Amino acid sequence: MSRIKGWCPGALRPMESGDGWIARIKPRGGRITSAQANAIASAAMRHGNGLIDLTSRANLQIRGIARDSYPTLIAELRDAGLIDRDIGAETRRNVILSPFADARAEELAARLEQLLTECDLELPAKFGFAVDCGAQRVLSDTPADIRIERGETGDLILRADGCETGNALLDMEQALQLARWFLDQHGAPDGRGRMKALIATGARPRGADLRPVPSAAPLSVGPVPQGRLVALEFGQCDGRTLAALARYGSLRMTPWRMLLVPAFDPLPGMSHLIQSPDDPRLRVYACSGGPACPQGHAATRPLARDLAPHLPKGAVLHVSGCSKGCGWPRKADITLTATPSGFFDLVRGGTASDLPEQRGLSPATISKAL
Ligand code: SF4
């Protein structure tokens, strides 16, 4: 019997938020067919508040679900092939696949998802796998504990996150063996823990001496060989936009607030959709904020949207509903952190919890401070 330690929301284990329940869907193989996209869009509009998040793990979240609607929503998503057999399988099946994956990489990811569904490993809830075996790596900045990549000689390698080198990968079972090694090495003593932290203690998988291919430069919106990358403003869109995108075919998820759409011409304008690499909203991060998040001291996205056109060229802005900084856990050129007073503190070159340069700014005075 498997047990999942820690806690992470899923579709079968929804999370309560300020705007209702949130159900997180993990698309198999990192993509959804047109029919699945339509099912998600329709469920979001009928059972939720119509909004859909794309998470930093390339999953989708339906927001604002009414408690009474939840069973029907799950039944509809199950009919669309979007629900796992049980909570254990759903929680373990943390696999991110490169959106540029070829058929071979898709096969590898499908095999890994099957093994994770069937195994009984007691992994921490946040423990994840990245299948990133193109000629260049694109997921090296995306959190994952075990990585399947291409080695410098072109063969597949299996790499523990935090290790610079990996082992030759001949069978996907090896990925589960590496996960078992993590547990045997006491990587998750109280049910929580990450591979990188274990590797930092000096632990090393035996014989890992193959170097992965280099990482690609960060990607932006625009054409790619498989279609077009389009970004969602703050990583969120509404059901109508998702349904409109579904008309182009299967959509591939990314962990960068972008979707890969199989379209080769620019798409018509749609709400929440960013198609120009010069759009300043690509450099703006804002969490759900209040009232959608119960911890939020103020609304964040309307302010972030208003400030975006005034951002200095190249600068990154983060507007956070509280000092937790979920929307951008890294440093930003400018961070505005809402405080219990409802006003904002301004941090330059830091995170939402760093010492502010100015305090108590209202939305009206912020533009001046910038
Ligand atoms: S940063 Fe605070 S307000 Fe924003 S989502 Fe996280 S907990 Fe909620």
Image: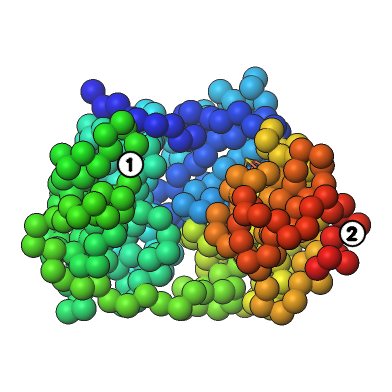
Q: Position of residue 37 (x, y in %)?
A: 56, 49
Q: Secondary structure at mark 1?
A: loop
Instruction: Identify the mark at residue 193; answer none if there is no mark.
Output: 1
**Looking at the image, which residue is at 56% across and 30% down?**
15
Quarter, ligand 1: top right
**Front residue of 254 and 268:** 254
**Left or right: where does residue 214 sit relative to residue 157?**
right
Q: Which residue is mark 2?
A: 365
Q: Amino acid at mark 1?
A: Gly
Q: Position of residue 191 (x, y in %)?
A: 31, 32
Q: Position of residue 183 (x, y in %)?
A: 20, 39
**Left or right: where does residue 311 sit relative to residue 103?**
right
Q: Residues within 10 Å of mark 2 (few under 14, many from 20)?
A: few
Coloring applied to the structure: rainbow
Q: Position of residue 6 (x, y in %)?
A: 39, 31
Q: Secondary structure at mark 2?
A: helix
Q: Amino acid at mark 2?
A: Thr
